[in-house]
Amino acid sequence: MTNSMQKKLHIKKGDQVIVNAGEYKGQKGRVLDVNREKSRAIVEGVNMVSKHTKPNAKNPQGGITKQEAPVHISNLNLVDPSTGEATRAGRKLNDKNKLVRYAKKSGEEIK
């Protein structure tokens, strides 16, 4: 898919999200990265996996490191800025005629 043809997702890098399905259900975290082609996101502290690393300049000892693995975005919901609960995202024009995301539960704008 070319950049102009990629699908629009309900989450972006830096969003506060809650996991709504799977092993990490109920955990909250910040989105570190989004892969739009695969519809996956890496969330801080969620879906931790052990990775075996060879010794290198950054890590001369090598060994096993823990890091986040991607989670499918269908298993993530935005956190409502006012209540702290899971919410769906909508898009609307604000007073400055700019398209913004808002929380459907409270109607509050998502920054």
Image: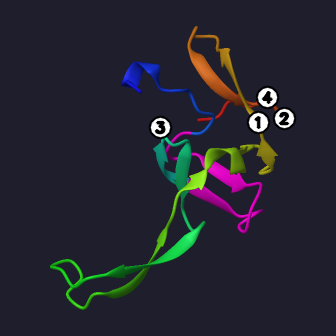
Residue 90 image-quadrant placement: top right
Disc 4 + disc 1, Cβ < 8 Å: no
Span shown in magenta: 12-30
Q: CA distance from mark 2 to mark 3?
A: 28 Å
Disc 2 + disc 3, Cβ < 8 Å: no
Name the residue beneath numbered marker 2. 105
Q: Element under label 3?
A: loop
Disc 1 + disc 2, Cβ < 8 Å: yes
Tag 1 or tag 3, which sits nearer the N-term?
A: 3
Q: Element under label 1?
A: loop
Q: Is residue 54 left or right of residue 39?
A: left
Q: Which mark is residue 88?
A: 1
Numbered disc in front, either 4 or 3 = 3
Name the residue beneath numbered marker 3. 37
Name the residue beneath numbered marker 4. 107
Q: CA distance from mark 4 to mark 1?
A: 10 Å
Image vertical order of residue 37 relative to residue 26, above or below? above
Q: Is residue 53 left or right of residue 97?
A: left
Q: Position of residue 93 (x, y in %)?
A: 64, 12
Q: Amino acid at mark 1?
A: Arg
Tag 2 or tag 1, which sits nearer the N-term?
A: 1
Disc 2 + disc 4, Cβ < 8 Å: yes
Q: How is the image coloured?
A: rainbow
Q: Element under label 4?
A: loop
Q: Residues within 10 Å of mark 2 (few under 14, many from 20)?
A: some
Q: CA distance from mark 1 to mark 2?
A: 7 Å
Task: Residue at 54%, 50% (x, y): give it.
Answer: 41
Tag 1 or tag 4, which sits nearer the N-term?
A: 1
